Image (spheres, rainbow, N blue to C red):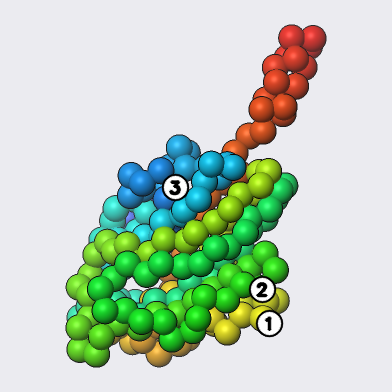
Amino acid sequence: MKRSLLLLGVIAALAIGAPAYSQYIFMDVNGDGACTSADILSSSTTTVDVWLNTNHNANGATVTCDSNASQPLDMFSYSLLFRSQGTGSLTYNGWTNAPAGYTATTPFTVAGTDAGTDYNGPTGANLGPGLVKLGTLGVTVTGSPRLIFLQDNVGSPGLNTAVTGFGTSCDATTYPNTYSLGIDFFDNCGIPSGTPTAATTWGKIKQLYK
């Protein structure tokens, strides 16, 4: 028993002492600056906002540079890859950048159900660590699709954007000074499809006859 308690204590100490490595990129449909169950895609959806928190994960915990904790998790560029899935369809109508002074290095490109773009900020004017609105995706929705972030463009040869991520003073790992989704961080939130009225009604009928 004493050995078990000692082992648990060691594990707890390691967990507390270990730095948390994550960031959080998310989509928002209703304009409240958060990704929640209230954000769904429907025929009335025309825009999807994209936000990034460079130094916090989804639960709000502060995180640090995974390669060197003394380096800031600021931002000087970003790259985005999207994919629509599910019933119905989603048409991409373009991307509107939000950070001042940022310019496109890869034009917004659509390849089937996927889309992507890259933007760079002004030289020497990195945005400090924290929450930043990256921009707004224009869409037309038919039926009940859902929208997710792609980690990379593998399987989408028509897209020149390589990864979903952001340029930062942190050295990062696989790609120099580029924090990449699925490599350097994992927390992300896309938008699910809405529930068609017909499906909801049929579900209620089935419950009545059980």
Q: Quadrant of residue 111?
A: bottom right
The Cα atoms of the two marked residues, 1 and 2, are separated by 8 Å
Helix, strand or loop for disc 2: strand
Q: Mark 1 points at which residue?
A: 157
Q: Is residue 79 visible?
A: yes
Q: Mark 3 points at which residue?
A: 29
The relative height of residue 143 versus residue 139 in the rendered view (above or below) is above
Crowd around label 3: few <14 · some 14–19 · many ≥20 (10 Å)? many
Q: In which quarter of the image is residue 90?
A: bottom right
Screen quadrant of the C terminus: top right
Report the mark closest to the observer, 1 or 2: 2
The relative height of residue 77 versus residue 52 in the rendered view (above or below) is below
**Looking at the image, is mark 2 or mark 3 earlier in the sequence?**
3
Going by the image, does 173 lie left or right of 170? right
Residue 89 image offset from top left, x and y in percent? 68, 53
Q: Which of the pair 52/173 is nearer the observer?
A: 52
Q: Name the residue under label 2.
A: 111
What residue sits 41% from the left and 56% below the top? 49
The Cα atoms of the two marked residues, 2 and 3, are separated by 23 Å
> Do labels 1 and 2 touch, CB within 8 Å?
yes
